[in-house]
Image (tube, helix red, strand yellow):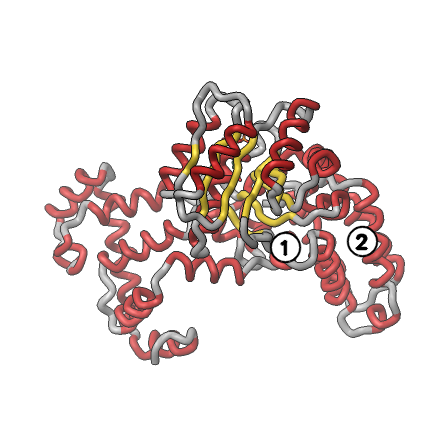
Amino acid sequence: MFNQLSDKLEGVFKNLRGQGKLSERNIKDAMTEVRLALLEADVDYSVARDFISSVRDEAMGEKVLKSVTPGQQIVKIFRDKLAELLGGDQAPLELTPPARILMVGLNGAGKTTTSAKLALRLKKEGRRPLLVACDLFRPAAIDQLETLAREIDVPVFTPDRDEKNVIKVAKQALKWAETQNGTVMIFDTAGRQEIDDALIRELEDLQKFLQAKEVLLVADSATGQQAVNVAKRFDEAVGISGIVLTKLDGDARGGAALSMRSVTGKPIKFSGVGEKIADFEAFVPDRLADRMLGMGDVVGLVEKAAEAVDEKDAMKMAERLASNQFDFNDFLQQMKFMKKLGPMENILGMLPGVGKKLKDINVDDGKMKRIEAIVLSMTPYERSRPEIINAKRRKRIAAGSGTNLTQVNQLLKQFSMMRKMMKNKGKMKGMMKQMGMGG
Ligand code: GDP
């Protein structure tokens, strides 16, 4: 996410930080570089210009220049202004009853996927979402939403496949909803390749009828400035309450995210960060600014971990580690937990300082899978007593896991080394204590 922009910014700031004293010249030069980086990232021209001038004005102040750490202070100013540019405070959804969310956008932006992602999120928050398929234009859209809804176990209203009148569908859906005990309705609407009159008219009519308090524009971040223009035009035509920026996972530049708020005046409320239904996040400007500057998103990481792991399990694991009982069964459980956190790249990217370096690291998901296959090919008894795994057993495990003897040996050796390291109980306990886990 934003690798390209992040790399450039980190380069400029590393330079600034490294200097004890800064002159106005240094700052001007740095800001010129930052401005170029923003333009390369496809940030709107006037947004980039105004942003740079506001950072420069503050950075040139006496207080900064005369301070002991001028470089650090400028990074801080930049970071805060960046968060402001991304939208300031996180924008919540308006969900007072009757809570209705209209999802609008061009074809392929990710409307249908995002409708399901949002439903899952609301469900996790304890609400009772209902999905309504109102995309009567794209032939497969209704089936797609139906499949996704089943996957996340959310009720879905699907119209007759030859129905062409969207208002009729909306009416039927409201009637259906009366029997569903839902608390918030999400309407997936039709898109087009481009904004045209027919689309706008349809959305206008639909919104006039539904009076949804949330009209969320779904926009593909990879299209950069085009996404911003689309948002602006949708807003002028039907009025939007917020934006969902999709495909941020593949967006190296960040131009759409950075220009959206300033140009449209509307907040980005959520972001799509992958193809899976769970790949969906609230858009938090503060955290994103940190991530863009390679400062990581430790809060996000901790939240993710808390969602994925049960606290009791974590404590149990810590105890077993401390008492040197850790075996391959624990190892398997830990791998399962890692998987829940999502792809390795995403996790590493959230760690401070790793974002930039990540592109050089080849996270080997294949290797993880291989290790897992080996462990799964052990019997439960072997897993709990790895020392009994002799040559014959090794051969069987290699065959069973589709690996070879060398790979099995290597894993066993690494595991036994790890255990030896853990034998130093005193040290381990001290570490646990430091980490706030048990005593
Ligand atoms: P719609 O035409 O606007 O309803 O778009 P779809 O929901 O069918 O999505 C179009 C494509 O984009 C699908 O292949 C989705 O899997 C993909 N997609 C949607 N959101 C994201 C995202 O956040 N990240 C990635 N990588 N792909 C996404």
Circle on res. 30:
2
Residue on which the image places disc 1: 91
Dot 2 lies on which element?
Answer: helix
Circle on res. 166:
none
Residue 34 to residue 56: above or below: above
Q: CA distance from mark 2 to mark 1?
A: 32 Å
Looking at numbered disc 1 in the image, what kind of residue is underneath it? Ala
Q: In the rendered image, which quarter contains the N terminus?
A: top right
Residue 372 to residue 321: above or below: above
Residue shown at 57%/50% (left/top)? 357
Of circles 2 and 1, which is in front? 1
Graded by Cα atoms within 10 Å as few (under 14), some (14 to 19) or many (20 or more), the crowding at tag 2 reads: some
Q: What is the quadrant of residue 190 in the picture?
A: top right
Residue shown at 79%/43% (left/top)? 36
Q: Earlier in the sequence, mark 2 or mark 1?
A: 2
Q: Relative to the observer, which residue lies in front, 62 or 212?
A: 212
Tell me if residue 66 can be seen.
Answer: yes
- Image coordinates of residue 267 in percent, x first then y, are 67, 49
Q: Relative to the observer, which residue lies in front, 129 or 70?
A: 129
Question: From the viewer's perspective, is 109 left or right of 130?
Answer: right
Graded by Cα atoms within 10 Å as few (under 14), some (14 to 19) or many (20 or more), the crowding at tag 1 reads: some
- Image coordinates of residue 206 in percent, x first then y, are 60, 33
Residue 161 to residue 212: above or below: above
Residue shown at 75%/58% (left/top)? 81
Tell me if residue 18 can be seen.
Answer: no
